[in-house]
Image: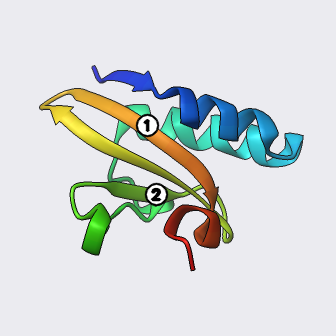
Amino acid sequence: MLNIAYSKKFLKSLSRLPKSIQNKAIAKDEIFRINPFDFRLKTHKLHGKQKEEWAYSVDNFYRATFVFIKDKEILFLDIGTHDQLYGK
């Protein structure tokens, strides 16, 4: 079983998203808890300044970023569009 924590930034960003995206994020969170590398999430390692972070797709435009703290401990860092998260 995974132990998942949410940063204040993640919770704040999530609360500002449209309700439809929040619902998609909740559905993806349920998949993530079973298998963080489920093909439906498109989980991938980030590069550059965020090289210690991972991300998965909520939908075609929104991503959630996270880090592995320990083997079964995960901290969700932020959620938003590609441009919001990666500053492009």
| Left or right of residue 27, residue 5 in this image | left
Dot 1 falls on a residue whose secondary structure is strand
Q: Quadrant of residue 76?
A: top left
Residue 16 location, x and y as percent? 80, 40
Q: Is 25 in front, or is 66?
A: 66
Q: Quadrant of residue 34?
A: top left
Numbered badge on residue 76:
1
Counting other residues with Cα less than 10 Å from the Cα at mark 1, is it few (<14), some (14-19), or many (20 or more)? many
Amino acid type of the residue tagged 1 in the rendering: Phe
Quadrant of the snapshot with the C terminus: bottom right
Asked if the residue under mark 2 is in contact with the one under mark 1, i.e. CB atoms within 8 Å, the reply is: no
Dot 2 falls on a residue whose secondary structure is strand
Residue 44 location, x and y as percent? 33, 65
Q: Residue at x 59, y 70 (%)?
A: 82
Residue 57 location, x and y as percent? 54, 61
Outermost residue toward the bottom?
A: 88
| Left or right of residue 58, residue 73 in this image | left
Numbered badge on residue 50:
none
* Protein image colouring: rainbow
Q: Is 18 in front, or is 37?
A: 18
Amino acid type of the residue tagged 2 in the rendering: Tyr
Q: Quadrant of residue 50?
A: bottom left
Residue 47 in sight in this render = no
The residue singled out by tag 2 in the image is 56
Q: Residue at x 44, y 65 (%)?
A: 42
Cα distance in 3D space between marks 1 and 2:
11 Å
Quadrant of the snapshot with the N terminus: top left
